[in-house]
Structures are given as C-alpha cells and as structure tokens.
Image (spheres, grey):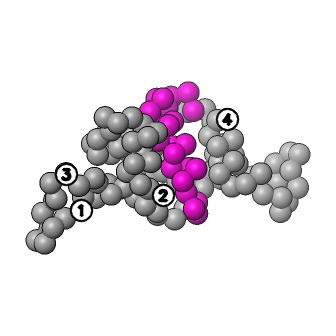
C-alpha cells in the first residue's frame, strides 16, 4: 500500500476520526491526495480546493479548517495573499495555500518495541 493509503487507513482507525467535520475530512483528503511528499510543505491550487469544498470557499474558511486539522496533528495549512509592490494584497487575486500533510506513525499507538502484530519489519 502506498504512503497516502496508509495514512488514510490510520486516520480512519483513529479515535478522533468521528470528531472531524465533513468539511475538515474533505480538506484532509484533498491535501492527502494532492501531496507529492508527506511531511513537506507544498502549494495546493485554489481551484482544486474550490472544486472539493465548494465555490463559496473563502480563505478564512480554509484557515479555520486547517487549524482544526492542525489540532489533530493531521496537517498544517498556511494561507498567504499575493501582493503588489509594497506588500499590499491584490484586488481579487486568489489566496495561495500551502499545506504539509504529517506522517501519522504516532497514531499506531504507544511506542512499540517491535513491529505490530501481523506485520514484518521493513514492510511499510
């Protein structure tokens, strides 16, 4: 199974999975499938976010949802705004969204002294 698939499986089996709102889960899935590398900050296209979360999406909503994902240790979301000379925001320019999807090894439970039951060492 690939790394995003493993992460999704861990999230679905976690105790706080049921506490995620539908929109938080949608954002996490978008970030997960868009991630080129787990643990590395990457830019995600505003249009991708709007297709997944709805046309009425705002930067404030992304920040709120991203904050919730951060509280759960799933991802970090950072929103910036394109600027003209002097650092002023442009009129109708879409915000730029960066995300980092975290490795979720810690969700496997308490630190173990070896591989989990039914898993061989080295088979990630």
Q: Is any atom of residue 42 visible in this view?
A: yes
**Local crowd at mark 3 within 10 Å, few (<14), some, or many (≥20)?**
few
Density class for disc 1 (Cα within 10 Å; few <14, some 14-19, many ≥20) is some
Q: Residues within 10 Å of mark 4 (few under 14, many from 20)?
A: few
Q: Which residue is mark 3?
A: 92
Q: Nearer the viewer, mark 3 or mark 2?
A: 3
Is 24 a magenta residue? Answer: yes
Q: Secondary structure at mark 4?
A: helix
Judge whether residue 14 is colored magenta: no
Front disc: 4 or 3: 3
| Residue pictured at 41% horizontal, 54% vertical | 45
Earlier sequence position, callout 1 versus callout 3: 1
User: Circle 1 — which element?
Assistant: loop
Q: Which residue is mark 1?
A: 82
- Nearest to the observer: residue 34 or residue 25: 34
Q: What is the spatial separation of the Cα atoms under label 3 and label 2, in whole angstroms?
A: 26 Å
Q: CA distance from mark 4 to mark 2?
A: 21 Å
Q: In the structure shown, which secondary structural element does the residue marked by tag 2 occupy?
A: strand
Residue 109 appears in view? no
| Residue bearing mark 2 | 100
Residue marked by disc 4: 13
Q: Earlier in the sequence, mark 1 or mark 2?
A: 1
Camera-nearest label, 4 or 2: 2
Instruction: Locate residue 27, reporting x and y percent.
Output: 47, 41
Q: CA distance from mark 1 to mark 4?
A: 38 Å
Q: Going by the picture, which residue comes out furthest to the bottom?
A: 85
Where are the magenta residues, as a range? 17-38
Label 4 or label 2, whichever comes before in sequence order = 4
Please indicate whether residue 35 sits to the left or right of residue 115 in the image. Answer: left
Q: Position of residue 78 (x, y in %)?
A: 35, 56
Q: Position of residue 57 (x, y in %)?
A: 33, 38
């Amino acid at each position: 199974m690939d790394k995003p698939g493993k992460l999704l499986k861990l999230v679905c089996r976690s105790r706080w999975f049921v506490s995620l709102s539908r929109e938080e889960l949608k954002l996490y899935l978008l970030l997960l499938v868009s991630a080129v590398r787990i643990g590395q900050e990457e830019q995600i296209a505003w249009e991708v976010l709007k297709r997944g979360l709805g046309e009425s999406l705002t930067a404030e909503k992304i920040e709120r949802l991203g904050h919730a994902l951060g509280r759960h240790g799933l991802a970090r979301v950072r929103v910036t705004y394109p600027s003209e000379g002097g650092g002023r925001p442009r009129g109708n320019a879409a915000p730029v969204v960066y995300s980092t999807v975290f490795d979720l090894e810690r969700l496997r439970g308490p630190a173990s002294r070896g591989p989990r039951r039914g898993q061989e060492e080295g088979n990630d």
